[in-house]
Image: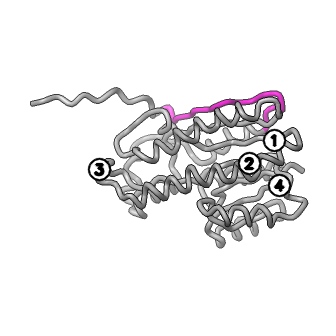
Amino acid sequence: MKVAMVTGASSGFGEATARQLIALGWCVIGTGRRAERLQALAAELGEHFHPLVFDVSERKACEEAVASLPPALSSIDLLVNNAGLALGLEPAHEAELDNWQRMIETNINGLIVMTRLISPGMVERGSGTIINISSVAANYAYPGANVYGATKAFVSQFSLNLRADLHGSSVRVTSIEPGLCKTEFSLVRFGGDAKAADVPYADTEFLSADDVASAVVWVAEQPAHININRLELMPVSQSFAGFPIHRKN
């Protein structure tokens, strides 16, 4: 049975990805900080879901969690680096430095640590797939995205550089870059303010977590000789903003 590790599996893209992979016969190691949610998923999804509680922003916790895996789960065929978050939409000169630091620690540091821990086994076995969840914010700037967009630009570029490093190893690397999608993402960004969190989705049709998970699973299920370098997806209702021009009165 193929083994996947999905970080940030307690909600959103990660939870949906875990469900879809298990439905296709994968065994999934689902990681996250919220033990109660992971335990509930394990109770629902059965023995093929293995919960692993830790915070990817803490390097020692990552190392201990990976080292704790039983032999049957230690050979990971698929790593989905999904754990990440956005905090705040203030302009840079008003943003909270603590929010910036937390996004860097999770979106960048967590991703690179998990990649460094899991990728050597893939290289040794001569197979494996790493899927990094980036964002359209990596490619298209918008007001308030400042550090969030920069962290996702790192994810996209790191994915390309990782692919170059792993050339000849048969290990595949993909960056998936979703657009407007309604999950807990917005609720977290607005500090639990449900009313503010709903504003970006008002009167429009957006992506769902299942839509993005389907893209992840499609990439993972491609024949071994095919690498999807990057995959950007948006709802039809979303497109590219024009360049704003400030005009003097």
Q: What is the secondary structure assignment of the residue under circle 4?
A: strand
SS of the residue at dot 3?
helix
Q: Which mark is residue 79?
A: 2
- Pick whichever of labels 1 and 4 is earlier in the sequence: 4
At label 1, the amino acid type is: Gly
Residue labelled with disc 3: 93
Q: Which tag is nearer the camera, tag 1 or tag 3?
A: 3
Q: Position of residue 197 (x, y in %)?
A: 41, 55
Residue 99 is a magenta residue: no
Q: Earlier in the sequence, mark 2 or mark 4?
A: 4
Distance between mark 2 and mark 3 Cα atoms:
36 Å
- How far across and down, in percent of the image, does residue 125 sit? 89, 43
Callout in the foreground (1, 4): 1
Instruction: Kindly indicate whether the residue at mark 4 contacts the one at mark 1 (C-beta within 8 angstroms).
Output: no
- Name the residue beneath numbered marker 1: 128
The overriding secondary structure of the stretch rendered in magenta is: loop
> Do labels 1 and 2 touch, CB within 8 Å?
yes
Nearer-the-camera pick, 112 or 239:
112
Q: Which residues are magenta?
A: 221-236
Location of residue 244 with respect to 24 vertically, above or below? above
Count residues near mark 4 (Cα–Cα under 10 Å), then give few for <14, some for 14-19, many for 20+: many
Q: Which mark is residue 118?
A: none
Which amino acid is tagged 2? Leu
Instruction: Return the disc, 3 or 4, that comes first in the chain's sequence.
Output: 4
Judged left or right of residue 149, residue 125 is right
Disc 4: which residue? 27
The residue positioned 69% from the left and 69% from the top of the image is 40
Tag in front: 2 or 3: 3
Q: Residue at x 38, y 38 (%)?
A: 142
